[in-house]
Image (cartoon, grey):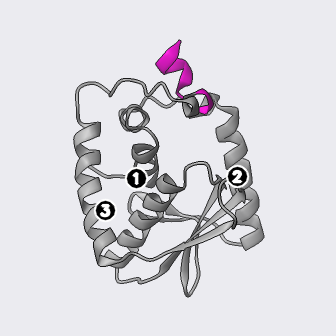
């Protein structure tokens, strides 16, 4: 199974969302928030004068001599974005490319800064390996987990699927 960056992000955000997406139930085309995020992503990409780089099952926003940079609409779920970035760093490392990671947010709500930096340490890589096993177990189940019933669910592209 090829795990994507989106699957990593969704796993940390909501395991049900991860299962639905991974099992080809894509509701994102109907989401205004997703459209806004894609537009902001395209604007950042044009500013950087670089296009996405596809490597295996991931799409990297930008690579410089020092950093792998991932653009996000907001800092609403920093943990999910961090693990997605660490996964990208692991894929690059496995290809012999060593970089630090940088998350750049178009909108900031929780963080004082619009940019966060991360390194793939041995401890984080070990934890990531465990996460990858958990994701595979999650998405190969016969049914998804129950909805979270969390306030963040109201903003989710899968809201109608889960609650209506």
- The tally of labels here is 3
Q: Position of residue 84 (x, y in %)?
A: 45, 58
Question: Which of the numbered marks, if any, corresponds to residue 4?
Answer: 1
Taking the spot 32% from the left edge, 28% from the top edge, the residue there is 145
Q: Where's residue 87, x and y in %?
A: 39, 64
Q: Nearer the viewer, mark 3 or mark 1?
A: 3
Going from N to C along the chain, the mark reached first, 2 or 3, is 2
Q: Is residue 65 magenta?
A: no
Residue numbers of the magenta segment: 154-164
**Residue 55 point in image, percent of width and height:** 43, 66
Q: Secondary structure at mark 3?
A: helix
Camera-nearest label, 2 or 3:
2
Q: Toward the viewer: 84 or 118?
A: 118
* Residue 109 image label: 2
User: How much space separates mark 3 and mark 1, taking CA atoms?
Assistant: 13 Å
Examine the rendering and report whether any part of residue 157 can be seen.
no
Residue 99: mark in rendering = none
Residue at image point 67% right, 71% down: 50
């Amino acid at each position: 199974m090829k795990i994507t960056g989106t699957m990593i992000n969704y796993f940390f955000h909501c395991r049900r969302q991860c299962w639905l997406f991974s099992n080809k139930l894509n509701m994102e085309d109907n989401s205004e928030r997703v459209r806004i995020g894609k537009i902001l992503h395209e604007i950042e990409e044009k500013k950087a004068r670089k296009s996405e780089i596809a490597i295996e099952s991931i799409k990297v926003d930008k690579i410089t001599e020092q950093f792998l940079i991932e653009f996000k609409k907001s800092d609403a779920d920093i943990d999910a974005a961090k693990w997605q970035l660490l996964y990208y760093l692991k894929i690059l490392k496995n290809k012999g490319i060593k970089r630090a990671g940088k998350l750049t947010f178009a909108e900031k709500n929780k963080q004082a800064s619009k940019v966060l930096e991360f390194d793939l340490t041995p401890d984080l890589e070990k934890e990531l390996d465990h996460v990858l096993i958990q994701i595979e177990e999650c998405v190969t189940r016969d049914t998804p987990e129950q909805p979270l019933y969390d306030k963040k669910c109201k903003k989710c592209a899968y809201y109608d699927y889960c609650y209506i």
